[in-house]
Amino acid sequence: MLASQQHRRAEEGFFFKEYVVKVKCDYCGKELDRKPYRIKNAKHHFCNRDHCCKWKNSQARPLPPSRTCPECGGPKSAHAKRCQKCWFASEQFQQHCAQVIVKAQEAVRGSTRTPEQREKYRQAALKSWTNNPKRRESLSKRSKVYWATHEHPFQGRAVPQAEKDAISKANKGKKRSPEFCQQMSEFAKQRTGEANSFYGKYHSPETRREQSLVKVGKVPNWCRGIYLSPIAGEFKYQSSFELRFAQVLDTLNWQWERSPDAFEYRKADGTGAFYTPDFKVLLNGQIRYFETKGYFPEEVQSKVQQAQLQATIIIVTLPILEMFERYAESQP
């Protein structure tokens, strides 16, 4: 625009300040200057975008019944079939999922997957689950919220013996992959010592009595055999080394039993654990503990040395055992 035209329009009153209308902000009520064409094209007026968004949120209409969760009353998105708060699924959505599962089973029925395909699916499932902590946390929260208000199908239900036998038969003779064994080993190492939820706790006498009654008549896996001692009664030994020493104690007529006492010690990584000797012997009115070892690795030496600071523990190696046997034979 030329300078002469600007001067003429200024004289005729075409500047912005002379052609404005006072309006109020619909959110805060502040007076605003707006041109007539903006007033004509807009129903509402605001100071800035922030006031516009806040006004829209305050004017939001209530959700229709179809978009409200029937369980908790929380909102659902327009396309969501499940409630984002309590994870409740409508009956229509459940029926849809059932139909999809049936169709997928019919499509797969009659076809077999190759070992390569199974391994590929397994690795994909492990990757999506183990490497996504946010997903694990989200599923855990949803599960806790859901089962807090719903009755769990297994609550108060004892697993029938037929199901136990079927599970045992399915897992019997099944070999785990080295990767799975390594993964379980690493997981178990993280729950030792003070990291274990039962660290420093003890079962009540009632619980110990119930566990004892359940194990009556059963032989544990670590037991190599049962020796009936005239002094200690039924003695379950782990090796022939223990059996020979138990027979020596009976020959010497010493009062002994399988040691019920445990001594706390620290591992190399600093975690706490408990060590239990093999035998507890009452000798000349004093208690002595005996540990039978055919070999004596460094990790065993460490825990025995720490336990020897708390009680008298005697290590019985093969030469010492043979010496005890010769001494017992020489006794009348």
Image: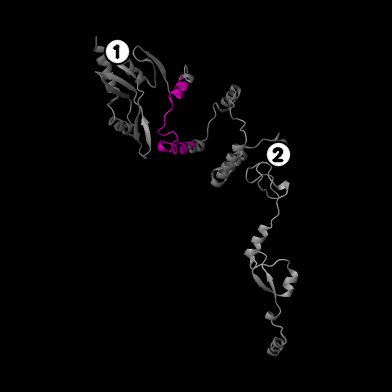
Q: Are marks 2 and 1 in contact (CB under 8 Å)?
A: no
Please, what secondary structure does the residue beneath circle 1 have? helix
Gap between marks 2 and 1 measured at Cα:
73 Å
The residue lying at 30 percent from left, 33 percent from top is 306
Above or below for 37 versus 95: below
Q: Amino acid at mark 1?
A: Thr
- Range of magenta residues: 184-212
The x, y position of residue 200, in whole percent, is 40, 33
Q: Quadrant of residue 137?
A: top right
Residue 281 % position (x, y): 30, 20
Residue with the most extreme top position: 332
Q: Which mark is residue 251?
A: 1
Q: Residues within 10 Å of mark 1 (few under 14, many from 20)?
A: some
The reply, left or right, for residue 25 in relation to residue 270 is right
Residue 44 drawn at (x, y percent) = 71, 66
For this rendering, which residue is in front, 237 or 200? 200
Instruction: Identify the residue at horizontal 57%, vertical 39% (top origin).
Output: 144
